[in-house]
Amino acid sequence: MKAFQAFLVALLLAQPVAAEPSPSVPHILYGSSYYSEYLPAEVGPERVATDAELMRKAGVRVVRMGESSWGTFEPADGRFDFGWMDRAIATFAAAGIKVVIGTPTYSMPAWLSHAHPELLAKPLGGGAVGYGMRQNMNYDDPTFRRYAERIVTRIVERYRDNPAVIGWQLDNETGPNGAANDGVFDAFVGRLKTKFGTPEALDRAWLLNYWGQSIHDWSDMPRPDFTVSPSYKLEWNRFQRTRVTSYLAWQAALVRRLRRPDQMVVHDFASAMRGDVDEFAVAPLLDVVGINVYHATQDRMDGQWQAMTGDYARSLKGDNFFVMETSAQTIGWNAQGQFPPYDGQLRLDVYANVASGANMLLYWHWNSLHAGLETYWKGVLGHDLKPGRAYEEVRRTGQELARLGGSVANLRMRNEVAILYSADSSTALSLMPYRAEGGGEWRPEQTTGYGSTLRQMHRSLYDADVGADFVSADDPDLDLTRYRLVLIPSLYVADDKLLRKIEAYVHGGGHALATLKSGFANEASAVRAQLAPGPLARVAGVTYQEFSTLEKPLPLRGDPFAVGPGNTVASWAEFLTLGTAKALAWYDDPNLGRWPAITRNRFGSGALVYEGTAVSDAIQYQVVRGLLRESGVAADVPARPAAVRTRAALGRDGRLVRFFLNFSAETQRLPYSHPAGRSLLSGRPVSAGAALVLPPWDVEIVREDALAVNH
């Protein structure tokens, strides 16, 4: 056990070597995941050739394969079968289609679980352990690593010299798998020893003597299964994120040692800002960040989810990214949420992602599955394997991208606004929620707590057609001075160093918006023994001792932001006492009306707005809009219909490319209020002041004629 602990600690403390910047591509890599091994037996092996020809006609340039099929590559211990993959790659290569192969390590084969049942991930609480679901193993175990290294080595060595294979995807949507096995716990204790030095130091930081649970020897450390300490739970979550980073670092090093030098290394994050994955730490291991962007369809599709996920993915390396999976038709692990996209929405989704900097877009997947949990997570082709409405739209889009060539690839964004993302605050506020949470781990698309505030901030920028970067609260080299405006959702957990950076940023001329609970707890999720908001009090110009849950929404006195029915706040109210700050809004309530709800403080050469309550979307938009004007980011709201969104990026030739995206079922008209250019879709010139007409769920792309200046 000691040897295993030493092995795991060494892995977790290892510093990975950073990868190169993301490679540029000559054109958008458009395609799909493909699984010949999932095809019904009665279809026959010739079906791959049929699919390759359909893809060729549709402008598909790349497929991803293999990431789920360890048991097909290795049906028994040490017995390998690569013929099915050899045939698939050869067929696609003949059609001019490139291949990305996924290392098949996120779902271990049945024979391995039977030979080594100790590899199965043991969950917190000691629940039953069994085989039958993917990602159900403890990948830190040396035995698992040995088998995983063998299969990865065999695959990479076999296909590295194949010119059709352009890259390797590490694992798939990697998370910590909920593993709390003995060896994992031993490694966690090793981490605590390194971090705190003595049990007494840990005891003081976490207040373990509460309820008499102090420890005085590391052997007394309780397991995480039943702890009630929020500080313990936060550190356990940090440790689990570190496990993910370490595992992907191990795979990245293995693949890099074996691959052909021009083959890229990518990983597909399962959406953005997962609380159990440190995407900012994983990104330097990769040549390209990959992310899976599943989105709402039909009347709920408004593009904001694609924009926010894309902004986040691009921020991880400050570079272009790949969408490794996106919706082809309907999605779901059952038949309850089947909402096939309207005509035009598949194509619009592609350009929404490209407008954020995506260089690759792959559908999950090509052929709809005929059995299994994802039977209703449909592919480009339906269950009948015939081209239909979705295929025709994919074909139109693929052929269009082929005509566009490199004009929309490798686009660059330079944003003046950042959102400060804190995974620790997200975790801590899910452990100590200030309002009812939706259950399960936090996701940005949920409408509660931390995620609600973060997405609301991004939506305010999105509605104003202002781009954003994400920056990590965990970045030791965090530099806020690059931005005119920084939005700070509920920074509940933060050390003094980070809060001093925010103070210095504002004092030096920056503008910031911070929301409720910011500055409240230290890095151990322990509440500071000083007036809230702790070290932020000076820059915020307010303090408070008390706070209250709001049983029902409250109005603000006098509708200060002129939002009419949206003039409400909810869930939480901090009883702010004004210091140097000025009140922007007060609660309209006979009891709480003595306290301001939103304040603004001039501090040095900059200013910070503080929201001590959860504001409505309408109020948040007006607050952000005011800060955009004040910070010089945007003078006013763009003159465009509410359903249209615009984004601008710098093309490889130094000219601005502007996207106009119509997220509605109605034809939209708007003036083109930019320098003269040319439509990349129609080839027609577009003069300043011309009227753009966007059919339902359609897009226009205009490239300016002149080179961009100071973009």
Image (cartoon, helix red, strand yellow):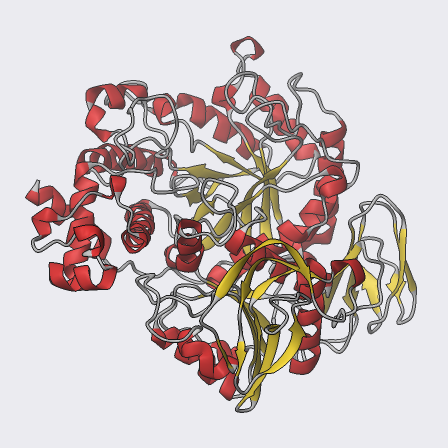
Q: Locate the C terminus by quadrant.
A: bottom right
Q: Give whichever of 263, 176 is nearer the camera.
A: 176
**Is residue 620 shown left or right of residue 202?**
right
User: What is the quadrant of residue 606 in the picture?
Assistant: bottom right
Q: Position of residue 650 (x, y in %)?
A: 66, 68
Question: Looking at the image, which residue is at 33% across and 45% down?
Answer: 255
> Where 407 falls versus 130 (above or below)?
below
**Is residue 218 shown left or right of residue 126?**
left
Q: Position of residue 258 (x, y in %)?
A: 30, 45
Q: Residue furthest top?
A: 42
Q: Work out whether residue 654 can be spotted.
A: no
Q: Position of residue 514 (x, y in %)?
A: 54, 70
Question: Looking at the image, which residue is at 33% across and 38% down?
Answer: 178
Q: Residue furthest bottom?
A: 604
User: What is the quadrant of residue 103 in the picture?
Assistant: top left
**Is residue 60 shown left or right of residue 130?**
right
Q: Position of residue 704 (x, y in %)?
A: 78, 69
Q: Give whichever of 528, 607 is nearer the camera.
A: 528
Question: Looking at the image, which residue is at 74% across and 72% down?
Answer: 560
Q: Give whichever of 622, 596 is nearer the camera.
A: 596
> Where 531 falls versus 237 (above or below)?
below
Q: How many marks?
A: 0
> Where 369 falls versus 408 (above or below)?
above
Q: Work out whether residue 11 can be spotted.
A: yes
Q: Locate the N terminus by quadrant.
A: top left
